[in-house]
Image (cartoon, rainbow, N blue to C red):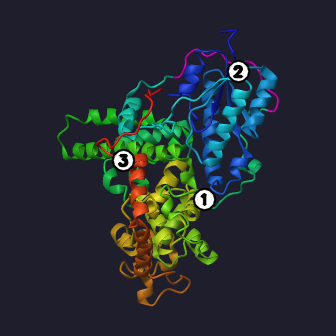
């Protein structure tokens, strides 16, 4: 392959060498140059944070070691993507560029479009294999999406290439080491202990979930206490790409098959939880597909009838929600836990968004930004589509207005979780701790910002006033066609035939 074009493999949120379509395919085409970009403009965005950078830094260090183990050397560029590609072009001339498809935020979407335009202008090929069960294009047929996802997940996993010709060039401006967060202007954001990143941590987390921690996944996932152990905790590794979705899926199917002949209650509980987990992997991509198909969902409601419905909230309410001082103990405990750990279970994420958007009537864009930078496992395709759904602005989903007190009683009946994260209330018993304002209050802990029943009714009335209009009903039908999940086909739109590519 000495006369073949150099193959530049751009590692983004796919920081591994196993089941890596770009690396495996590029290795068959020509000498490989693996690169990683650290883009300061991305890390200056309001939904970015130190904890997210640190996770990716750990995963990047792991990637560097994985590439070294197979004889290569990762080149690291600090700066914008187009400058990086120009530096490569100056050094090595024409090349092929590889990068997995990415469903990131609007900034990455625009950056990738600019990269495509740059490559086209310079007559360079840019290949983007699928990484998740998420496909590009406005002609996507949702009726067959689930079958396409199943087919992709069942395909053979790409092994680590055994024979790679590594390109010898060491282009100017590239470094060998992964920079720290301070180089992009980030400072520590208050997280007490970040979940370890990297390939070894990812595979260990998957194994421990499938063989030790996951038996009660179906029930544990609803509790902020039990979920910390009983949930898979793979979200950070999927975000960084230290492990692939296909690896997770196939390992889960294998584990479930191992238990198929075991009739014990223990095995039955395992099988049920593993089936539930497979469903969650499916939903992971289902929500990412929504943002991929309609990138404006990061900023605008998919149902335009609701646009501008919620006014900005006061700075005081904004700060109270962001710091866990709303006067609702369970809400505040969840928020403070998230601030300290970078993770909280899905139900509590939904509750936090519900509280912000219904009780405080905060725009989901504003509440979503607060939460996004706190999630170490921030996945824009999931986060922004979920933010809209939980706020009631899709026009098709049931309004889910969580009672902060009921959620606390259901998932923290004895108040243990609240006492851990809201120590001001440690002296209250299990009953009073959920509604301290009814028991004289506690010095140093705020009164509730709102009356939940009154605020929830006002929010519900405002949404239904729009939802009942003829215009909103017509729009809801179109939203369901574009983004709704379904078991049976709906009225088909014309679309070009599309094959699933690995």
| Residue 163 within the magenta-colored segment of the rendering | yes
The label nearer to you, 1 versus 2, is 2
| Residue 342 position (above or below residue 418) | above
The label nearer to you, 3 versus 1, is 3
- Residue 49, position in %: x, y? 65, 54
- Residue 191's tag is 1
Say whether residue 442 is left or right of residue 83.
left
| Residues shaded magenta | 160-173
| Residue 294 within the magenta-colored segment of the rendering | no
Asked if residue 61 can be seen in this view, the reply is: yes
CB under 8 Å between callouts 2 and 3? no
Q: Judge the density around disc 1: few (<14), some (14-19), many (≥20) Cα neighbours within 10 Å.
A: some
- Our reading of the magenta stretch's main secondary structure is loop
| Residue 127 position (above or below residue 30) | below
- Name the N-terminal-most of marks 2 and 3: 2
- Residue 234's tag is none
- Name the N-terminal-most of marks 1 and 2: 2
Q: Judge the density around disc 3: few (<14), some (14-19), many (≥20) Cα neighbours within 10 Å.
A: some
| Residue 449 position (above or below residue 261) | below
Could you say whether the residue bearing mark 3 is in a helix, strand or loop?
loop
Question: In this view, which residue lies farthest toward the bottom?
Answer: 440
Could you say whether the residue bearing mark 2 is in a helix, strand or loop?
loop
Of the pair 138 and 278, the residue shown nearer to us: 138
- Residue 95's tag is 2
**Separation (CA) of disc 2 from disc 3:** 40 Å
Question: In this view, which residue lies farthest toward the left?
Answer: 263
Q: Quadrant of residue 397?
A: bottom left
Of the pair 36 and 365, the residue shown nearer to us: 365
Q: Quadrant of residue 141?
A: top left
**Separation (CA) of disc 1 from disc 2:** 41 Å
């Amino acid at each position: 392959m000495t006369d073949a074009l150099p193959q530049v493999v751009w590692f983004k949120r796919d920081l591994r060498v196993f089941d890596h379509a770009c690396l495996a395919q590029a290795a068959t085409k020509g000498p490989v140059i693996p690169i990683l970009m650290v883009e300061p403009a991305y890390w200056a965005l309001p939904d970015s944070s130190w904890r997210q950078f640190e996770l990716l830094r750990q995963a990047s260090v792991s990637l560097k070691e994985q590439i070294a183990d197979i004889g290569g050397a990762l080149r690291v560029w600090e700066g914008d993507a187009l400058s990086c590609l120009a530096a490569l072009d100056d050094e090595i001339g024409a090349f092929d560029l590889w990068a997995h498809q990415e469903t990131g935020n609007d900034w990455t979407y625009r950056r990738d479009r600019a990269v495509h335009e740059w490559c086209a202008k310079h007559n360079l090929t840019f290949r983007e294999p699928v990484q998740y069960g998420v496909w590009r294009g406005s002609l996507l047929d949702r009726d067959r999406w689930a079958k396409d996802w199943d087919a992709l997940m069942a395909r053979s996993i790409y092994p680590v290439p055994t024979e790679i010709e590594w390109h010898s060039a060491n282009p100017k401006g590239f470094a060998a080491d992964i920079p720290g967060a301070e180089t992009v202007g980030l400072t520590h954001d208050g997280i007490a202990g970040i979940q370890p990143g990297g390939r070894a941590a990812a595979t260990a987390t998957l194994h421990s979930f499938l063989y030790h921690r996951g038996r009660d996944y179906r029930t544990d996932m609803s509790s902020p206490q039990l979920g910390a152990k009983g949930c898979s905790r793979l979200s950070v590794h999927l975000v960084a790409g230290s492990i692939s979705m296909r690896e997770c899926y196939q390992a889960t199917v294998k584990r479930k098959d191992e238990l198929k002949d075991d009739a014990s209650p223990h095995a039955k509980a395992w099988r049920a939880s593993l089936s539930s987990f497979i469903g969650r992997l499916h939903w992971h991509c289902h929500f990412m597909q929504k943002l991929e198909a309609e990138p404006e969902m990061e900023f605008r409601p998919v149902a335009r009838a609701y646009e501008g419905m919620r006014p900005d909230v006061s700075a005081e309410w904004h700060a109270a929600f962001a710091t866990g001082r709303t006067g609702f103990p369970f809400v505040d405990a969840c928020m403070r836990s998230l601030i300290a750990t970078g993770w909280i279970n899905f139900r509590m994420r939904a509750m936090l968004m519900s509280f912000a958007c219904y009780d405080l009537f905060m725009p989901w864009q504003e509440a979503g930004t607060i939460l996004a930078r706190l999630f170490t496992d921030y996945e824009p395709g999931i986060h922004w589509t979920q933010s809209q759904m939980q706020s009631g602005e899709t026009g098709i989903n049931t309004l889910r207005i969580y009672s902060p007190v009921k959620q606390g009683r259901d998932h923290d009946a004895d108040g243990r979780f609240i006492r851990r994260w809201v120590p001001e209330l440690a002296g209250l018993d299990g009953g009073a701790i959920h509604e301290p304002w009814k028991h004289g209050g506690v010095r140093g802990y705020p009164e509730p910002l709102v009356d939940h029943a009154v605020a929830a009714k006002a929010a519900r009335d405002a949404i239904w006033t729009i939802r009942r209009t003829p215009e909103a009903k017509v729009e809801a039908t179109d939203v369901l066609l574009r983004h709704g999940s379904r078991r049976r086909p709906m009225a088909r739109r014309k679309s070009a035939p599309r094959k699933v590519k690995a």
